[in-house]
Amino acid sequence: MPDPTFSQTQIAERIAELGRSIRDDAGELDILLIGILKGSCVFLADLLRATPGRVNYQFVDVVRHGGGEEAVGINFLTHFDMAGKTVYLLKDVVATGVIETYLLDQFRVRKPAALKLVALLDRPQARRVLLEVDFTAFEVESGVFVGYGLEHEGGYENLPYIAAL
């Protein structure tokens, strides 16, 4: 097993802080968390429980061209309305920013009251587009990370911590 980069305790403490920060940002407004499958599932579940007040959630899946970084479509797993809502888009690892920029552009058309990007892991040095992450759990350098829902070659996503391979 790989050694932890971020321990289970560090993750829990940071997610609790993020939940409070997101609630402070949204004020008394309802919050809609949208997780990008599949890497954000564990992150979304913990952040959902850590965010005080009324919070809803949904999942979307991104269809990629050839499995690469170019998004070609969004699969909405259920029909939901984001018009007028305070929306937080959750991504496991934000690196190049290409897919996140595509999703944010597509979601803006649906007229949310606010739209913010939340990253479990942010790699700003890998950006290919101008993109700012509104809330970040952890900033990382290059590398492949596993655990806490992040998988590599079909394994390691069940680790309770995040590790670099």
Image: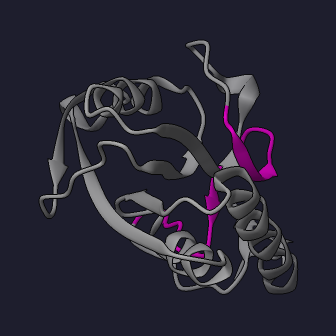
Prevailing secondary structure class for the magenta stretch in the rendered image:
loop
Q: Is residue 149 magenta?
A: yes
Q: How many marks?
A: 0
Q: Residue at the location (22% across, 52% down)?
A: 81
Quarter of the view holding residue 58: bottom left
In percent of width and height, residue 52 lies at 66, 78
- In the rendered structure, the answer to whether residue 111 lies left or right of residue 56 reads left
Q: Residue at the location (34% across, 60% down)?
A: 37
In percent of width and height, residue 27 lies at 68, 57
Q: Residue at the location (51% across, 70% down)?
A: 44
- In the rendered structure, the answer to whether residue 9 lies left or right of residue 105 reads right
In percent of width and height, residue 152 lies at 49, 63
Quarter of the view holding residue 127: top right
Q: Is residue 164 visible?
A: no
Q: Give the camera-side residue of 77 and 83.
A: 83
In percent of width and height, residue 53 lies at 60, 77
Quarter of the view holding residue 9: bottom right
Instruction: Give the quadrant of the C terminus.
Output: bottom right
By what rule are the colours in the image chosen? Answer: one colour
* Vertical order, 120 against 124 (above or below): below
* Vertical order, 46 against 21 (above or below): below
| Residue occupying the far front of the picture | 28
Instruction: Give the quadrant of the N terminus.
Output: bottom right
* Vertical order, 102 against 150 (above or below): above
Q: Give the camera-side residue of 26 and 143.
A: 26
Q: Residue at the location (45% across, 24% down)?
A: 101
Q: Is residue 26 visible?
A: yes
The stretch of residues the image draws in magenta is: 133-153
- In the rendered structure, the answer to whether residue 35 lies left or right of residue 136 reads left
Q: Is residue 45 magenta?
A: no
